[in-house]
Image (cartoon, helix red, strand yellow):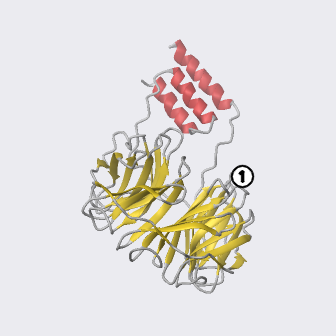
Amino acid sequence: MKLKIFAHTMLFILLLMPFPVLATEWAKTYGGSGSEDARSIQQTADGGYIVAGSTASSGAGSSDAWVLKLNSNGNVTWQKTYGGSDNDYALFIQQTADGGYIVVGQTESFGAGSRDAWVLKLDSNGNVTWQKTYGGSGNEYGYSIQQTPDGGYIVAWGTASFGAGLRDAWVLKLDSNGNVTWQKAYGGSGYDFAGSIQQTADGGYIVEGYADSFGAGSYDAWVLKLDSNGNVTWQKTYGGSGSEVANSIQQTADGGYIVVGQTDSFGAGSYDAWVLKLDSNGNVTWQKTYGGSGSEDAHSIKQPADGGYMVAGATDSFGAGSSDAWVLKLDSNGEISGCDIIKTSNAPVSNTSVAPGNSSIVGGTSYASIDSTNIQPNVTSAVVSTICSTTPSECSTWTDVISKYNLYVSGQALWSDVITCYNQYVTP
């Protein structure tokens, strides 16, 4: 009893103490009278954010690429459009070592074909350092770019101008000025596509996408491990009798890979979000689906410091609207304890045998008009719905309460979590 009176006294003292300001949480919209779309966001070195997408409210054409620099509270530092008289889109952005940005997308205003892949190098204020298109007589689609340690870039695209089939996965290594060092197309007789690329610890690259030239179903998820010159080390498809798509891949701390996408061969609904853990040779360690009776998709996955995984996607089985944004925090085995929306899948793994073909595109310089925009952010109040979560450990000792308080001080817990923990302690 004396200990609990002491605990009450200590908590009262804690309430009177000055506390550090916690990280601000916010939700905002950015747009004008037309349609806007944000496709990529990254936190910047200054604690703010850089966003890339497209806008039909401002710019030179019917749709322009759009880049916004936000501060840590989501307020606009600067915003610019990039484009010509037709449709132009920014699909991925990354801050570069010099404090500027590299943007990849697609353009219908410039280039050799009706739609070309497009790369823009921006300085820290959004001014163009260089811009180039890459393509042939068909359509090219640019989706992923990463700066490499040599100061150049690796890009993953889809091409209908080069390769063996109707559309091939396409990887280009660029130097720091956007000139092509090497370029290769990968595919069979059908539609094959590269959606994401990352440089691996051994200096090579891991590429994910999907293929209908190989595999078990109409489309299968497809992963290729390349060496530093784009030669294939291994390549595998993952899928069942339906359609599977891989949307994002990341090398994990153990040297393997984590892949996220969508499946309609396995799971609970018409489409389920799908996560596969692979070893360093592409063999499946585990694979799981996540979803309800409707359709779910997973677009992006990251491994945080705790060894689990953060997944972002969309759901129409859960939430407040017809389709809601969806975020899942998984443990290292892809689980959320006690959550019944997770199922184990058993997609067959097949080795593919595509040989890369050398493509011969030369990057062409584009001359997109650059306009500053003045769209103002609006604060939103999206409904947050919890689907399932791991039950927190009970706070049965005063040490548990102090530990929760220390998490609050470090910005890793809310004050309400401290109160809940304390109440669990005083009311066993």
Residue type (three-letter) at the residue carrying disc 1:
Asp
Residue at image position (42%, 40%) is 332
Q: Is residue 153 above or below residue 11?
A: below
Q: Secondary structure at mark 1?
A: loop
Q: Is residue 166 above or below residue 102?
A: below
- Quarter the C terminus occupies: top left
Name the side, left or right, on which 186 lies relative to 378. Answer: left
| Residue that numbered label 1 is attached to | 46
Residue 275: where, in percent of width, then height?
Answer: 38, 51
Residue at image position (62%, 84%) is 61
Residue 228: where, in percent of width, then height?
Answer: 54, 55
Residue at image position (49%, 48%) is 251
Viewer-proximal residue, 104 or 282?
282
Q: Residues within 10 Å of mark 1 (few under 14, many from 20)?
A: few
Viewer-proximal residue, 231 or 21?
231
Q: Is residue 427 visible?
A: yes
Residue 317: where, in percent of width, then height?
Answer: 34, 59
Residue located farthest toward the left when viewing the structure as drawn: 241
Residue located farthest toward the top when viewing the structure as drawn: 2
**Numbered circles on residues, count:** 1
Residue 62: where, in percent of width, then height?
Answer: 58, 84
Q: Is residue 320 above or below residue 365?
A: above
Residue at image position (62%, 56%) is 148
Q: Is residue 173 above or below residue 390?
A: below
Residue located farthest toward the bottom when viewing the structure as drawn: 85
Q: Is residue 315 visible?
A: no
Viewer-proximal residue, 290 or 75?
290
